[in-house]
Amino acid sequence: MRTCGGNRWWTQEAKLFIRRERGATELVLGGVCLLASVGLGLYVVWAEEWSPTLVLCVLGLFCLGLYNALGVWEVTLHAGRGRVFWAWGLGWPLFRRTRLLTAFDRVQVVTPEHRSGEPVQATDCMVQLAGEGGPPHLLAGSDDRDEALTLAEAVARHARLGLQVGGGRVRPYEELSSSAPGRTKVLSSPEVRPGSSAPGSARPLSSPDAREEATGATSALVEPPTPPPLGCRVQVREAEGRSEVLLPAPGWDGGFRSGAAVGVVMGVLGLVPWGVAVAVQASWGFFAFVTLVALAPLGACVVFMRRALVGVHTTWRLTVSRAGVEVVRAGVGAPQTTRIPAQHLRDVDVRELREGAPGVGLFQEASCPMLVLERQDGEYQAMGAGLPRQELEWAAARLRQALARAAEARRQLQEEGVRSRSAPK
């Protein structure tokens, strides 16, 4: 994981993420602005100074405080789907904008000396996607030229676009690929390197050795089931040629308490102005003003509480058969079913992920281990947020064993079909 100004970026399979980082300075500034808006709002009520200037100052300080304390801004480049997503919100990405990567032909690094009539700001170098048919779209910025160039080159290689620095020529993707140091692939986890496996994980199913195991070339490669870790709540059932792995709901011990606590705090912040209005017996105009101010924290309360409640009660059932894997997610709302054919499944592993992880991540982005089913096209489905890593690794090992047995069963059926067709009549 690397930085570019106030953003952090990393690659994960077919995706490249750029995310705004909230540092201690921004959090303190956000808290100060929120307190100042509350104090100024109380003064407006007490002195009955309903001038437009004071009202706008209260709203401006309140919005600035929320942006610095809870503002989220991130960019996701999905090379497999050929799209780029911009998402922003408060505490959680609430709004999203999507563009096709085909709309851009280069990654552009705008330096101060090549800005037309614009003053040099604290953030000097801007990394953006540019094309002939529209305005450029910002990815990140930094006052460190090397950080901006490193991010721009990574984006250009990931999206297979050209690279332009300042007003110079556009270097094509082929030139960037040939000049890549070591021609190495950036992995999503620093512990996993080409040709090796993370502790507790098996080889990718797409590797030659794993293909031999998956096709059932020898049944000796299927290791016997290992005993579950002490206190393991993951259940495994086998019957009628099917294997079921049940991931239980993590409960409040899975790390969702912090999100619920933030939701409660935001709810209290939204209700306090109404309590003040009732105490001072304010007019209808003040009630309308209080309602407008309380909408943002109450909305954030709903987002955090819903996320925590959904995570606490979510369970997963994975059924392995000869056809592939069926994943059923149950909990809040109707169950959701996803089916992955056996030929589309690439790997089963446990990885440290950020998307969907419990926790708030104010000073550092929250992450947790999750069970991952990766497809051949780079897409993956993560599950089991909040469960201990040892239990997830044991569940992943049992899934790989069940997949190997299913592959052996398919191979035997194919051989029987070949023998029956070739037998003399």
Image (cartoon, grey):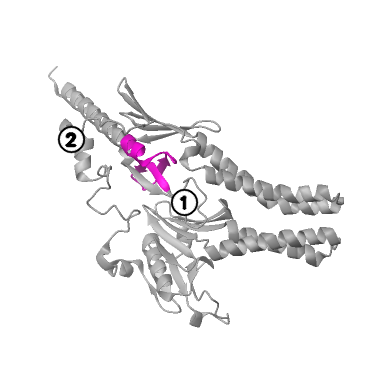
The relative height of residue 119 versus residue 11 in the rendered view (above or below) is: below
Q: Nearer the viewer, residue 20 or 204?
A: 20
Q: Within 10 angstroms of label 2, few (less than 14), some, or many (20 or more) residues?
A: some
Residue 412 lies, in percent from the top left, at 20, 26
Q: Is residue 297 visible?
A: yes
CA–CA distance in space, label 2 to label 1: 37 Å
Give residue 48's quadrant in the image: bottom right
Q: Within 10 angstroms of label 1, few (less than 14), some, or many (20 or more) residues?
A: some
Quadrant for the N terminus, please.
bottom left
Residue beneath the point at 79% across and 65% down: 54
Residue beneath the point at 76% across and 62% down: 40
Q: Say which amino acid is labelled 1.
A: Ala
Residue that mark 2 sits on: 221
Q: Is residue 48 left or right of residue 229?
A: right
In reply to whether residue 219 is colored magenta, the answer given is no
Q: Is residue 68 left or right of residue 58?
A: left
| Callout 1 secondary element | loop
In reply to whether residue 386 is colored magenta, the answer given is yes
Residue that mark 1 sits on: 366
Over which residues does the magenta segment extend? 368-396
Q: Say which amino acid is labelled 2.
A: Leu
Q: Earlier in the sequence, mark 2 or mark 1?
A: 2
Q: Nearer the viewer, residue 414 or 298?
A: 298
The relative height of residue 186 versus residue 117 in the rendered view (above or below) is: above
